[in-house]
Image (spheres, rainbow, N blue to C red):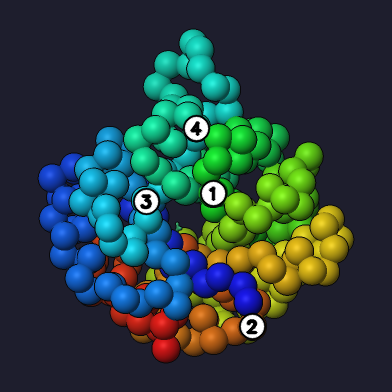
Amino acid sequence: MRKTVIAGNWKMNMTPSATRTFMETLAPMVKGKDKCDIVLCVPFVDIATAVEATRGTNIKIGAQNVHFEPKGAYTGEISAEMLKEVGAEYVIVGHSERRTYFGETDTTVNLRTKAALAAGLTVILCVGEVKEQRLSGITDEVVTMQTKLALADISAEELKRVIIAYEPVWAIGTGLTATPEQADETCGVIRRALAGLYGEEVAEATTIQYGGSMNDKNAAQLLSKTNVDGGLIGGASLKPDAFTAIVDAANA
Ligand code: PGA
């Protein structure tokens, strides 16, 4: 009953021309594989090309960040309305790279989430613990706190357009993957946090992805877990073959 969502996060990779080639290659490979939603979150300058190249396919396009103000003197920033108009349907908010390298806080994550939802975008909201937090046994507290702070003042109705991505920071880009059991357990902790905020029914209906070195080899096992409703995929989303294999795992 929950939607499985396989989303790629290209990060700072691919030019517009490379984007066109990639989408034209990928589209026939994932055609008809409709047991999951397929999303690619691309750099801002690639969005228009990606939207055009995937028109009429089952691939949807997202951005990787959004500013929380509708407009104004925010040099270098992009608003939710701009993303909407260029054809993005999704946006990643609160990725750990933004939290670590660009000073993103739980407060700005909440503001960005609200702005994106108000504009009609679907948010892929990232939470996850760093290695020291897992080693000290406070993973559950960390992801619960991040989830609750990110969702402050967001209604159950709006939550229908929120996907949570559980991304242990120690697993991102490192080749170290959480075990399927760890992923299932922590996605379950997030689901309980959602139940506390919105009730059991809403929590059960919310898509919670795992992210962090998910690839064509480990996707099937991770996706087989009850609480894992998809993946947010970095490195492996840059290769049509690997990304398609993950989509296949979600369609098995
Ligand atoms: P990775 O990245 O798959 O390359 O580990 C995941 C992410 O950062 O979303």
- Number of numbered discs visible in the structure rendering: 4
Residue named by callout 1: 122
Q: Which disc, if any, is residue 80?
A: 4
Type of the residue with mark 4: Ala
Asked if disc 3 and disc 4 are in contact, CB closer than 8 Å, the reply is no
Earlier residue among tags 2 and 4: 4
Could you tell me residue 14's position as x and y percent?
A: 22, 48
Judged by depth in the image, the label closer to the viewer, 2 or 4, is 4
- Which secondary structure lies at badge 3? strand
Asked if disc 1 and disc 2 are in contact, CB closer than 8 Å, the reply is no
Type of the residue with mark 3: Ile
Type of the residue with mark 1: Thr
- Report, in whole angstroms, how far the alpha carbon at label 1 lies from the one at label 4: 11 Å
Q: Is residue 98 left or right of residue 173?
A: right
Where the C terminus falls, by quadrant? bottom left
Q: Which disc, if any, is residue 61?
A: 3
Residue drawn 72% across and 50% down? 157
Earlier residue among tags 3 and 4: 3
Could you tell me residue 177's position as x and y percent?
A: 49, 74
Could you tell me residue 39's position as x and y percent?
A: 40, 59
Which quarter holds ligand 1? bottom left
Label 2: few (<14), some (14–19) or many (≥20) C-alpha neighbours in 10 Å:
few
Q: Is residue 92 left or right of residue 204?
A: left
- Which secondary structure lies at badge 4? helix
Label 1, ligand 1: CB separation under 8 Å = no
